[in-house]
Amino acid sequence: MLNVSLSLLAAVPTTLEWSPKVGAVMIACNVLAIAIGKYSIKYPSAAPALPSPALFGGMGFPALLATTSFGHILGLGTILGLSYLGAL
């Protein structure tokens, strides 16, 4: 049992260190997700409202939370894909 556990620990891939390029990719993915969400969410201005709704195109808190969650998932895949290709 101990040998199996040690083998699984050794199988962890190396992770990419944070850099400004990684941050820029994540920001771009979040901006893209907010743009997609603004036009595809049925009720983007549902309550509760944000303190400055004009900054986010009139979106409410639930829509912002949903789009940025999607943006982080999109960014994770993009960053891992680009790092696998050697572009980051």
Image: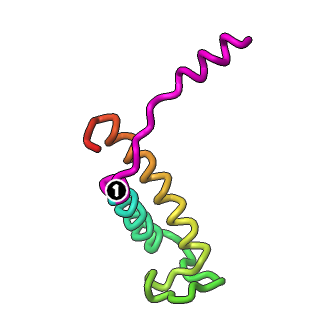
Q: How is the image coloured?
A: rainbow
Q: Which residue is mark 1?
A: 25
Assess disc 1: are there few (<14), some (14-19) or many (≥20) residues with their C-alpha within 10 Å of its C-alpha: some
Amino acid of disc 1:
Val
Asked whether 60 falls inside the magenta stretch, the response is no
Which residue does the image show at 45% across and 48% down from the upper left?
76
| x and y percentages locating residue 85 in the rendered image | 29, 35
| x and y percentages locating residue 43 in the rendered image | 57, 78
| Rendered image quadrant of residue 31 | bottom left
Can you say which quadrant of the picture contains the C terminus?
top left
Which residue does the image show at 66% across and 13% down from the upper left?
4
* Magenta-drawn segment: 1-23
Can you say which quadrant of the picture contains the N terminus?
top right
| Rendered image quadrant of residue 24 | bottom left
Q: Is residue 75 left or right of residue 4?
A: left
> So how many labels did they put on this image?
1
